[in-house]
Amino acid sequence: MEPRKLIIFGGACSPVTDQIAQAARHWNLVQLTYADTHPMFTEKVFPHFFRVVPSENEFNPPRLSILRYYNWTRVGTLYQNEAKFALAHNNLVSELEKNNFTIVESQSFNDEITNQLDILLKKDIRIILGNFDEPGTEVLRTPIFVKRHLTGEFENKKVAALSVEVNPLVFQSNEGLIRFNIVTTRARKSLEDFWECTLNNGGARGANSTSCTAEEILIALKGTMVMEIQPLSSVDDITISKLTPSEYEHQYINLTRHYSRYHGYAYDGIWATALAIQDAGHRARHHNRSLATFNYKDQDWERLLIDALDRTSFEGVTGPVRFKENSRRGNVLIKQIVESPNGDVMEHCIGEYSGVTRTLYLERCGKVSWSPGDRPPKDRTFRRIVQTRVDFTIYIILVITASLGIVLAICFLAINIKYRHNKQIKMSSPNLNNLIIIGCILTYSSVILLGLDSYLTSVEAFPYICTARAWILMSGFTLSFGSMFSKTWRVHSIFTNVELNKKPMKDSQLYLVVGTLIFIDVIIMTTWQIVDPFYRDTKELRPYESRAKTRSLWTSGPRQVLLQYPRSFNSHLIAPENHCTLQKVKLHFGVDSQADLEDLWW
């Protein structure tokens, strides 16, 4: 007689696992999987289903921990339109909202993500949490990615990061199609064995393809963070099998030619199965029963085995093994792709997350590398008002120059008054010359007023300075230009007097012309000041990009690649322009700022 099956161990892929789980419930059988991470297998839907490998949902707590660690509260999400990732994404959104994180935008995709990324980037989302796996070859075929990594076209735009399960990644650039494919996960000497990179000129797959160099791989991947289930425990203590994780791994490598990242979970799963059967057998004997009397129709045996797995707790090669809500809370390993001392590309462990204690141990096994720079990014573009001013050195130079002009004009005025009876000076209309000089002095004085800003004077005095600027510049120009115009008019009238029957214009007539121009200006300015006086206004200029070096970070699935853009992304600095303006007539008169911005770290 064929022995009865007490527990089903497997499967490894969701379609098979789902069929087995659906059938197992009709046979009152308990199922334990070592490799299926699909979040649809919940305790509520499949109470007889257990897994020794963490589910997709178990990658959400370390995500939140990383967000808290770097004080990131503003995020966007991007997920693939498949149940496996949609369910994990829904759980992530629920946890984010529960913990007061701001989800700016959520986008899903099927085969192409350019439009979705455009939407996320237009909303200035720096941190993008992604749920998707290797989508064949075309899912990530988007100019945005490759331009980020290779051409730097979006260098001064947004900062983003994407978690990708396993890969390949495919980028379309001006140089052609760039593809990264995972070849093997077995022990490797360098990432050149791990990533197969081909550049197909003209975007034609397979045409003129060439392998990427280590430098090209480093450009695309440097700073990328990788999150995956921890294959083996980092604590090399004796486990339930009397072997340390390193001793077990040595035996595993010697006994098999095939490498699976789930081998440790399969090993611990066998131990969990054996311990659960042993525990169920002990408890059955208290009811005068034995494993030999196991019956598929007896639901008590199913309950005994479920309770036995719930009570299972031991130290396995993958870490502490215990179940909560039929799922394993395992450890998550966090790595970063960096440049090795000899210039190659290498994976560098930077930390891990304990699913049992719910604790993030960042920089536990290595330091996080922020390159260029040594600071983590921010989760948004910061708009900082940077108070600017007229450069004091330049202002002093202009004041000294204007003052020299005033002194020189005063000297000319003194000479003109002292030698006004001189024949040559008298013929040039010295009184009009005096008006011209006075107008120049006023115009030079307006230069000093035009350079004053709120740093050199009070904000309350600024409207009066605005008024003084207009009056003094107007008066100086009218006196100088009006007097010069009057003198020119008289010369014109003399040379056009062919018959010599007209008397030359007298100085009093010229004074009347200048006085009329001044009177018109006074009427206009007085009416202006009464109806629509000047006031101080502030206008934001076009944002400047600070030269701060910023980056971003990520978290997700059993083997997740966290894309991190390797260039600088700048925060916006807003320079306010203080100027004199009017309410009814939009006239900007005099600028009280200069775009002399400081470099800021964000």
Image (cartoon, helix red, strand yellow):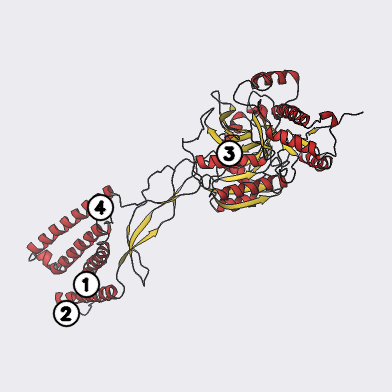
Q: Residues within 10 Å of mark 4 (few under 14, many from 20)?
A: some
- How far is mark 3 from mark 4, CA to CA? 60 Å
Give x and y (percent) for residue 307: 72, 36
The numbered mark, 4 or 2, whose residue comes first in the sequence reads: 4
Could you tell me which secondary element the residue under label 4 belongs to?
helix
Give x and y (percent) for residue 163: 62, 41
Extreme right residue here? 1
- How far is mark 2 from mark 1, CA to CA? 16 Å
The numbered mark, 3 or 4, whose residue comes first in the sequence reads: 3
Give x and y (percent) for residue 129: 60, 45
Residue type at numbered disc 3: Pro
Q: Could you say which disc has been placed on residue 263 in the image? A: none
Give x and y (percent) for residue 433: 16, 66
Q: Are marks 2 and 3 in contact (CB under 8 Å)?
A: no
Q: Residues within 10 Å of mark 3 (few under 14, many from 20)?
A: many
> Mark 4 or mark 2, which is nearer to you?
4
The numbered mark, 3 or 1, whose residue comes first in the sequence reads: 3
- How far is mark 1 from mark 4, CA to CA? 31 Å
Could you tell me which secondary element the residue under label 3 belongs to?
helix
Residue type at numbered disc 4: Leu
Q: Could you say which disc has been placed on residue 486 in the image? A: 1
